[in-house]
Image (cartoon, rainbow, N blue to C red):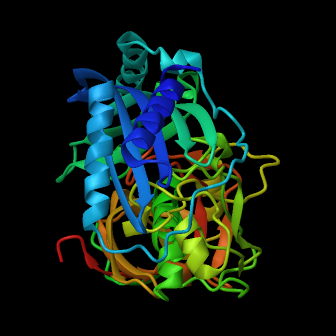
Amino acid sequence: MNVVDNLAARALELAKAELGPSAEIEVLAERERAALTRFANSYIHQNVADESARVTLRVHHDGRTAAANTSRVDDGGLRALATRVAAAARLLPADRLWPGLAPPASATGHGPVDQATAEATPAERAERVKAFVTAADGLAAAGYCGTTHVESAFANSAGHHLAGAYTEAAFDGVARATAGSTPADGVSRFASSRIGDIDGAALGTRAAGKARSSVDAAYLPPGEYEVVLEPEAVADLLAVLGMYCFNGKMFVEHQTYAKPGEAQFDPVLSIVDDPSAAGRPFDSEGTPKRPLDLVRDGVTTAVTHSRRTAAEAGAESTGHASLGSDVWGPIGTHLTIDAASDGAQSPAADVAAMVEEVQRGLLVTDIWYTRVLDPRPLIMTGLTRNGVWLIENGEVAGPVRNLRFTQGYPQALGPGRVLGIGRCAVTQPTHGFGYQSYRAPALRLASWRFTGGAEG
């Protein structure tokens, strides 16, 4: 057994001693080594590294459920954690929806672990930053290159035990052009389980090209426009759909758009939550993760479940419990859009081919600051950033200023609305709740509702 295996076993042993044989107990132990190289104004200004361990304990005792975690992982800290959770359980109301412990089951074992990424040095991250800055060719550059190695172990009092590990390398960089009347930014993002996959020069070239072509952006009136969304923008669609549309808690509470069995999306669209390429191979309740079709050929086929939401829905857990899922619900964290990969060249080639088919529309690099206006139809508002261009007669006519939009995400992907799906998907860096990794292609959509300028 390695360090986290021993830690999970010891925490379970001490919790049993504190709570007695009648308690149902879950333990999740994790050790994370994370390092980050940040740069601004084209210079590295920070190298940080952190190694931490955490144990999360959840117990169901005398009909009540409580959970807590600690970063004190010696015996004293683990005993204190067990005492604290036992005391909390005595004070809480009865948990009549407790679904019970996950039974023993096997997972796929370790996720993608790249030793070079786990052991990456500041100098290796700096090489990629230098390549990005050099490729930006005089533009001000900022961003980060980060590496992460996580080891996890799960154990419960039903005799279930799992262990796994994964690595992630991520790059997020912006280049800024100041030659025009206002600064113009371009962005490139990329993530992989291998630091060797990060090409700083290619990322810098793309970001700088976008920044230079965004100088002196013109005003465009609000309205409905056909759009080509680049992978950075599509990643936000996937994140929002995972959190709100296919969320099992929202489904059982009748707050979600998803209706399994109905053709709610364009028939060319298939969305899969596929954890096989990233992250821990089991969830916080010890349920093994597996690829899950959420939409297949336009038909909604499933929502994501923890053991609790699955029990309420009369279904089975899909392995999507997290440390906050009792509050936020089980969230799909590895969504991707199926697309033909044969003949795939690059996201840029995908975008260029889509632009050629548009008579009048907008090319959108990125969207952000997105917020829910109405959760059931999933109407969102947000802003464009890092480059927007008007398309006329199959050509990019020129940059436009950032716009605010108000758009139902499922409606934008509805029947007859998806006009093109890129062949080459890009994995975007982790963000949000825990480990999230969205693999996004470019999309061409029939309509997107822009409601004002970024100032309004």
Which quadrant would the C terminus be assigned to in this image?
Answer: bottom left
Which quadrant would the N terminus be assigned to in this image?
Answer: top right
> Residue 303 placed where, x, y %?
61, 73
Identify the residue at horizontal 31%, vertical 74% (top origin).
Answer: 93
Answer yes or no: is residue 312 visible: yes
> Residue 31 placed where, x, y %?
42, 29
Identify the residue at horizontal 63%, vertical 43% (top origin).
Answer: 159
Q: Nearer the viewer, residue 80 or 17?
A: 17
Residue farthest right in this picture: 342
14 shown above or below 99:
above
Q: Nearer the viewer, residue 131 or 13?
A: 13
Answer yes or no: is residue 138 visible: no
Counting the numbered discs, the total is 0
Identify the residue at horizontal 41%, vertical 41% (top origin).
Answer: 15
Left or right: 297 with respect to 179?
right
Identify the residue at horizontal 60%, vertical 33% (top origin).
Answer: 164
Left or right: 447 with respect to 77?
right
Q: Nearer the viewer, residue 58 or 278?
A: 58
Q: Nearer the viewer, residue 182 or 28?
A: 28
> Residue 132 placed where, x, y %?
40, 27
415 shown above or below 176:
below
> Residue 55 placed where, x, y %?
38, 38
Left or right: 291 with respect to 8?
right
